[in-house]
């Protein structure tokens, strides 16, 4: 008999299958969680572990496992209702950081049957956090070190940060003092705050940066600072403007230097423009870099014509150009030269090729790493002429004293000769042959007396009664007598300006000047026909470089000119034309005193003579008489006429 026990295990099998499926789901969950998961029983044996745990902690030493799991004897009752995160580091070939969550496993009756851990590898996150910290520290160092003010604000205009430089700008001791403040809290004036707010609002509304905006604000000490500020909008991930970043450079010192430089340049250019000396700068290659107006007046070149050209090509005569270039080459290497710090006179060259006597002073300066030169050049034409005139006047004065003494002695001798001869002639009959001889003696004595008179006139280089004289009227009155004493082949033309002006002078002496000049002009044609022009005109001498003419002070003058187209004179003759007893005429035809007398008369009238002549081109003599400042006088020498009896010859 077979007996059996049949039990219904359907529920058991179902439970087993459900458990199996549950275990599979649990295994799938822990295997795909990405975390290292393990369960250890109370005896310290790991009863559950996923592949991630085995991969990371398989073969781990006791120290590491003790960090992962609590001590066996540790009371885990505190793990029932919460979790604890513990960061641990495992040291091997690589270092990893984990966040470990531990909790106690308990039965329904509350008995513990193990400990479960879940460990997440956060090494990459920790490295990113550390990198962020380092970068933040580096950025903060850069922001603090950079010599610019840096700040950032939110959309409401409140400062959310900035560097120490930005804090100092507002008179704050620490950058944290800026936090939460607005520009109204920091700006010196409401106007300043309003201006900055308008610029900030424009950036916030438009989303467009504002680059290199020049701002000014009043510091706490009352000084005004100038900033060059750029403002950039700050945008979040969705493209919304959340604030702005500002970076500014304090350019107060630079602006002060620029202003000082502008003032210095303005002062230099003012001096360079006002001075009558040429100022010429040449770079290290001897090329002209600066050329003032006075240099244009002296040399004839404009600045546009010479800047960039070699200085020696412009100023130095061709004969000395090579030597000048050699001297500059030596100067360029060392910044030293034999002419530096000295003043020398030499002959420069005008644009038209004519030589110019100039005085040169040289200095050196180092610019852009090379030695450059500064030349101050003075045209000494007028000074040399004045010195020559002074020497001439001194010579004339000495000769005048000598001639005066001689003339008086000769006059004392001639007067008895004339007197006694005339007395003897009165006792002789007209037909007596000795009467004719005595007549010749008297004629020669009278001629000698006229020469003595000229010598006396030459010696008297001062004195004479000065009255208001209308120059045009005086010349018109004497013109008919000049024409009558001139050969028919000579035509005298008159170009007289009736408004030439009144002068203070001696009409007789002025007419003597005209007679002598007309006589010389007549003789220049050498018995040939020609034209002599008499001009009377007004002239104004200005105050500029070319204002003074032959020593004339600025002012109004009446000009008397005698012009001929005769044989003319060379330079050597012109140099001595005013010297006493100098003549180009044959012996017996001239005394050489005519032009000396003219020079003396003009000097007594405080005037000036200018003589232009060239061989074959004739001669022009210009005489300038200072005009009276007052209106034309009521009485004058208008009716004074001198009849020339025997015009003196030169």
Image (spheres, rainbow, N blue to C red):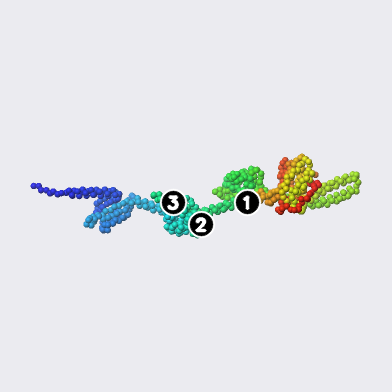
Q: Secondary structure at mark 3?
A: helix
Q: Secondary structure at mark 2?
A: strand
Q: Which residue is mark 1?
A: 275
Q: Position of residue 524 (x, y in %)?
A: 75, 42
Q: Which mark is residue 318?
A: none
Viewer can see residue 483:
yes
Q: Residue placed at 77% from the left, 47% from the top?
A: 478
Q: Are marks 1 and 3 in contact (CB under 8 Å)?
A: no
- Mark closer to the chain start, 2 or 3: 3
Residue 418 left/right relative to 247: right
Relative to 350, say whether 104 is above or below. below
Q: Which residue is mark 2?
A: 224
Residue positioned most to the front: 634
Q: CA distance from mark 2 to mark 1?
A: 37 Å
10 Å neighbourhood of mark 3: few (<14), some, or many (≥20)? few
Q: Which residue is mark 3?
A: 205
- Mark closer to the chain start, 1 or 3: 3
Q: CA distance from mark 2 to mark 3?
A: 29 Å
């Amino acid at each position: 008999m077979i007996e059996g026990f049949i039990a219904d295990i359907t529920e058991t099998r179902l439970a087993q299958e459900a458990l199996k499926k549950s275990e599979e789901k649990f295994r799938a969950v822990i295997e795909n969680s990405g975390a290292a998961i393990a369960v250890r029983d109370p005896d310290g044996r790991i009863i559950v572990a996923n592949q991630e745990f085995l991969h990371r902690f398989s073969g781990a030493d006791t120290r590491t496992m003790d960090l992962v799991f609590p001590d066996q004897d540790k009371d885990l009752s505190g793990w029932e209702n919460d979790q604890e995160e513990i960061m641990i580091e495992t040291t091997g070939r690589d270092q990893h950081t984990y966040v470990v969550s531990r909790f106690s496993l308990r039965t329904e009756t509350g008995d513990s049957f193990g400990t479960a851990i879940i460990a997440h590898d956060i090494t990459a996150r920790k490295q990113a956090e550390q990198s962020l910290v380092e970068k933040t520290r580096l950025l903060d160092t850069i922001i603090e070190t950079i010599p610019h003010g840096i700040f950032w604000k939110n959309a409401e205009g409140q400062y959310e940060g900035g560097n120490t430089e930005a804090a100092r700008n507002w008179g704050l001791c620490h950058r944290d003092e800026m936090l939460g403040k607005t520009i109204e809290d920091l700006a010196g004036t409401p106007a300043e705050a309003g201006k900055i707010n308008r610029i900030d609002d424009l950036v916030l509304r438009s989303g467009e940066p504002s680059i290199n905006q020049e701002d000014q604000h009043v510091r706490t000490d009352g000084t005004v600072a100038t900033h060059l500020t750029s403002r950039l909008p700050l945008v979040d991930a969705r493209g919304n403007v959340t604030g702005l970043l500002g970076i500014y450079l304090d350019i107060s010192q630079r602006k002060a230097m620029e202003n000082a430089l502008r003032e210095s340049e303005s002062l230099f250019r003012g001096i360079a423009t006002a001075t009558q000396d040429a100022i010429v700068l040449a770079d290290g290659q001897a090329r002209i870099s600066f050329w003032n107006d006075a240099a244009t007046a002296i040399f004839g070149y404009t600045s546009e014509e010479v800047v960039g050209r070699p200085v020696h090509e412009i100023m130095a005569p061709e004969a000395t150009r090579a030597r000048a270039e050699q001297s500059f080459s030596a100067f360029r290497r060392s910044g030293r030269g034999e002419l530096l710090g000295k003043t020398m006179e030499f002959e420069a060259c005008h644009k038209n090729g004519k030589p110019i006597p100039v005085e040169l002073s040289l200095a050196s300066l180092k610019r852009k790493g090379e030695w450059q030169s500064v030349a101050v050049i003075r045209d000494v034409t007028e000074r040399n002429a004045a010195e020559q005139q002074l020497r001439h006047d001194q010579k004339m004065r000495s000769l005048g004293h000598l001639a005066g003494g001689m003339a008086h002695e000769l006059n004392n001798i001639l007067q008895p000769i004339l007197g006694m001869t005339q007395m003897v002639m009165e006792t002789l009959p007209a037909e007596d042959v000795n009467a004719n001889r005595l007549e010749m003696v008297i004629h020669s004595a009278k001629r000698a007396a006229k020469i003595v008179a000229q010598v006396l006139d030459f010696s008297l280089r001062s004195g004479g009664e000065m009255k208001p004289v209308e120059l045009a009227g005086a010349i018109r009155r004497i013109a008919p007598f000049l024409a009558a004493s001139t050969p028919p082949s000579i035509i005298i033309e008159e170009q007289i300006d009736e408004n030439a002006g009144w002068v203070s002078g001696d009409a007789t002496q002025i007419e003597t000047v005209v007679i002598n000049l007309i006589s010389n002009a007549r003789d220049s044609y050498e018995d040939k026909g020609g034209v002599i022009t008499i001009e009377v005109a007004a002239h104004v001498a200005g105050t500029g470089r070319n204002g003074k003419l032959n020593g004339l002070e600025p002012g109004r003058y009446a000009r008397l000119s005698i012009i001929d187209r005769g044989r003319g004179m060379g330079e050597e003759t012109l140099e001595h034309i005013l010297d006493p007893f100098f003549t180009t005429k044959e012996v017996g035809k001239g005394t050489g005193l005519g032009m000396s007398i003219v020079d003396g008369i003009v000097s007594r009238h405080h005037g000036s003579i200018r003589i232009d002549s060239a061989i074959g081109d004739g001669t022009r003599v210009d005489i300038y008489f200072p005009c009276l400042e007052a209106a034309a006088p009521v009485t004058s020498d208008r009716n004074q006429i001198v009849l020339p009896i025997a015009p003196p010859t030169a």
